[in-house]
Amino acid sequence: MREPVELRRQRILAAVESRGSARVADLAAELQVSVVTVRRDVEELAQEGRLRRGHGVVRSPLAAQDLPAARAPAPDGEVVAVVVPERHTYLYESLHGARSVLEAAGRRIALHIAPQVTGAERPLVERALADGAAGLLLAPRWRTRADEEGDYGWLALLDVPAVLMERRPRPGSALHAMDSVCSDHAHGVHLAVQHLVGLGHRRIVFATRDDSPTARTLRSACARIADAHPLVERWAWALCAPEAGHDGPYTAQETAELPALLREVGATAAVLHGDVDALMLVQRLADSGVRVPEDCSVVAYDDVVAGLGTPPLTAVAPPKADVGRAAAELLLQRLAAPRGGGGPVRRIELLPALSVRGSTRACAGAADRPE
């Protein structure tokens, strides 16, 4: 799916604001779009007063050269490098949360966007350290378990404080003793299931992606919670998009078209990770004459754009910005402590919340069903 224009421009703004200035060619390479596209975006942003243009260079309106000396950028030893995957709106909210904490502490952010290829984070981290970064906030893409474990060795050898955002390494691994701040996604699934069961739904389809640690955590939580719930009669899991199944051995049911799977299971509700896939399911159901929420309730997981749908989607909202803030606060504690100090390793979990909107309602006949 092509990235929305406004999202791409927000990424340009984030990159320029974190660095003070950036070359147009570098932005095009990071965003994997043409230089012409970036120039067009920059022109629009400049007209809105959100950027300043130069010859091949883009500057923030608050660039260092336009500020009083007291607000000059921090020296290299005060720089924190942040590495996040490209085209990941969820983690960009975490980035902005971290930025608010770091800037208040006088730290400058060096933002690095990792392209969608295996192993992209390591050279970015090495570059950041060579440029003098004192600490790191990291959210590796880790599309597969093998990708994740392949990064354990070099991450465990980092000689500066580092905190993982929304990533929790496997227990007992070389990276187990690394600070991390995550959303408690199992609690998020629990909220979704309890909401639907409370509305009388007894048959539920869950769908997640196959390309992120969050998706893998959600899949495991869906199975555990649905299996254990005494009121869930039947459930099934599938990929949000059947074409995504090229990365693993999946059954025919797990790669089935979701409207067909809902019919097969007799499901009256679905929980999808994330918002865009949930919005598209609502459209696909409408095309086949299934109304949301009258015939099928839908819960999205992420709550980035879920509220913009028709109807607005009920959604589980992980505390995205708070994850970034907590990770930045933990990193600042490590940076302030003597080398090797700062107390025990911390694995912090923050609880998601449920926003109930127009895409869920009581299941037909639920009032007459015995509990």
Image (spheres, helix red, strand yellow):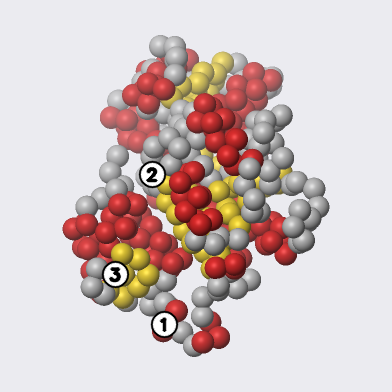
Q: Are marks 1 and 2 in contact (CB under 8 Å)?
A: no
Whether residue 103 is visible to the viewer of this picture, yes or no, is: no
Name, please, the residue furthest toward the right.
343
Please tell me which residue is depicted at 27% across the width and 74% down the height of the picture.
53
Name the residue type under label 1. Answer: Gln
SS of the residue under disc 3 = strand
Q: Are marks 1 and 3 in contact (CB under 8 Å)?
A: no
Residue at image mark 1? 65
Q: Is residue 183 above or below residue 56?
A: above
Name, please, the residue furthest toward the front.
130
Earlier sequence position, callout 1 versus callout 3: 3
x, y percent for residue 260? 37, 18
x, y percent for residue 89? 44, 49
Q: CA distance from mark 1 to mark 3?
A: 14 Å
Q: Residues within 10 Å of mark 3 (few under 14, many from 20)?
A: some
Name the residue type under label 3. Answer: Val
Q: Is residue 198 above or below residue 54?
A: above
Earlier sequence position, callout 1 versus callout 2: 1
Q: CA distance from mark 3 to mark 2?
A: 22 Å
Q: Are marks 3 and 2 in contact (CB under 8 Å)?
A: no
Q: Quadrant of the C terminus?
A: top right
SS of the residue under disc 1 = helix
Residue at image mark 3? 57
Whether residue 344 is visible to the viewer of this picture, yes or no, is: yes
Name, please, the residue furthest toward the left.
36
Specify whether 222 is left or right of 87: right
Please tell me which residue is depicted at 61% across the width and 57% down the height of the picture.
135
Residue at image mark 2? 115
